């Protein structure tokens, strides 16, 4: 954790000092390494949480994870509100410049996190497995049907969660949303995300209900994504709802649905992690979902070429393609629904039954690894292209 915070602070400090004179490529590369440090911290935190969660009594299994994730949403909310208030300098005439913002980000971990690491209950590791044995353990985990079958659904589910990649530009061009309005939407989203996790923990955790949760989240997110069309046709004005408040409410409901489905995947991953390999196993499993999110971003960026929805098109008054792209990307999300009863267990008991020896498939584990490696390489290539050729349409550009 110390190393991760140090890396993040170092690169944020470099950005604070030199960002006004940087090229886009240099800026993006430094931001990448800053985020890498934070991801290192996040992986270690997840490893500690997974170890503690695995030791929970069966009667309360999942309660600890739910509590920690609610705290995570609350701290995100504080960060988003602070960022919203401090980053609206152009509109309000006061606040932080970009350099000052990165300077604050460089200092924050040193005063808000590092001093408390002294009190952290870190388990003592008597011995570390050789790398070969660790790889064998990971392959055994992936060969469990309780691992590769839910993973297949998680990858498919997140890959199909496409979105209108031009929507942010549309809100800025048409409704002139400022930094505070964008940030406050994210802050409110974290607040209702907290509510979603609490709702699942309080009312659904005991029975699992994973089929209902993912079906509910898919339908709600898709429907309220489609509802953005109301802003395009300005129907909100006929309802007497200002565009900001409509967008805020629409985003909040979708974030609640995300919050409800946040805990089930964490519980699934924790149930299959091998003892002594919590960090690498949980990071690998959550990595599948993150890589699938990268696939969804690539698909969303590629769909920008179907209709003229680039920033230049909107500034020229061409917004007709926005509602079409919103409708298309929202409807794609419904495609995951038929796979829920086929690939996804409904309860912890259903998941544990898939751990039985007769369900072990070495081929399933190898296929999972192939998907992970291919996804990782894909994300690396897309990230490199985004840095070196940001004009490419596949990474969200307008075409070179």
Image (tube, rainbow, N blue to C red):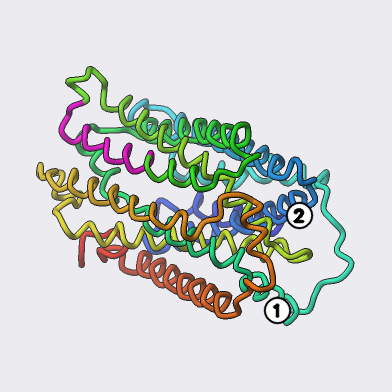
> Most prominent secondary structure in the magenta stretch?
helix
Q: Is residue 106 magenta?
A: no
Task: Please state the extent of the stretch shown in magenta in the rendering.
Answer: 220-235
Q: Is residue 399 above or below residue 345?
A: below
Residue 261 image position (x, y, % from top left): 52, 44
Residue 150 image position (x, y, % from top left): 54, 60
Q: Which residue is mark 2?
A: 51
Q: Is residue 224 magenta?
A: yes
Q: Is residue 366 above or below residue 120?
A: below
Please tell me which residue lies in front, 168 or 370: 370
Is residue 13 visible in this depiction of the protein?
Answer: no
Quarter of the image containing the N terminus? bottom right
Quarter of the image containing the C terminus? bottom left
The residue at 56%/67% (across/down) is 148
Residue 66 position by quadrant: top right
Label ID, residue 247? none
Q: Is residue 227 above or below residue 215?
A: above
Q: Which residue is mark 1?
A: 136
Residue 262 position by quadrant: top right
Neighbourhood count class around disc 2 (C-alpha, 10 Å): few under 14, some 14–19, many 20 upward: many
Q: In this rendering, would 362 be left or right of 329?
A: right
């Amino acid at each position: 954790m110390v190393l991760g915070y140090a890396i993040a602070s170092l690169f944020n400090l470099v950005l604070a000092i030199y960002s006004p004179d940087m090229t886009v490529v240099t800026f993006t590369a430094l931001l990448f390494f800053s985020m890498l440090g934070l991801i290192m911290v996040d992986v270690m935190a997840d490893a500690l949480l997974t170890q503690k969660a695995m030791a929970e009594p069966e009667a309360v299994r999942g309660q600890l994870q739910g509590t920690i994730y609610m705290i995570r949403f609350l701290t995100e909310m504080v960060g988003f509100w602070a960022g919203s208030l401090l980053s609206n300098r152009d509109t309000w005439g006061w606040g932080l410049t970009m350099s000052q913002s990165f300077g604050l980000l460089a200092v924050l971990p040193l005063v808000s996190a590092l001093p408390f690491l002294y009190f952290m209950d870190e388990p003592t590791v008597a011995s570390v497995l050789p790398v070969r044995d660790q790889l064998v353990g990971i392959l055994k985990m992936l060969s469990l049907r309780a691992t590769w079958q839910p993973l297949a659904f998680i990858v498919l589910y997140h890959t199909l969660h496409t979105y209108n990649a031009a929507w942010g530009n549309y809100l800025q061009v048409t409704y002139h949303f400022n930094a505070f309005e964008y940030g406050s939407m994210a802050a409110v989203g974290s607040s209702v995300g907290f509510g979603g996790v609490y709702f699942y923990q309080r009312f659904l955790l005991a029975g699992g209900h994973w089929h209902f949760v993912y079906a509910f989240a898919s339908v709600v997110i898709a429907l309220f994504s489609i509802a953005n069309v109301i802003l395009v046709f300005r129907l909100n004005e006929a309802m007497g709802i200002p565009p900001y408040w409509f967008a805020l409410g629409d985003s909040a409901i979708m974030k609640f649905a995300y919050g409800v489905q946040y805990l089930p995947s964490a519980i699934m991953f924790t149930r299959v992690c091998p003892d002594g390999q919590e960090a690498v196993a949980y990071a690998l499993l959550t990595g599948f979902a993150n890589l699938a999110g990268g696939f969804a971003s690539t698909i969303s960026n590629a769909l920008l070429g179907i209709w003229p929805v680039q920033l230049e098109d909107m500034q020229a008054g061409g917004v007709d393609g926005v509602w079409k792209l919103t409708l298309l990307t929202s409807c794609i999300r419904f495609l995951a629904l038929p796979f829920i009863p086929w690939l996804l267990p409904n309860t912890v008991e259903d998941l544990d039954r898939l751990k039985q020896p007769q369900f072990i498939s070495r081929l399933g584990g190898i296929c999972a690894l192939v998907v992970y490696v291919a996804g990782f390489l894909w994300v690396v290539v897309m990230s490199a292209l985004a840095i070196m050729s940001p004009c490419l349409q596949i990474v969200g550009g307008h075409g070179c």
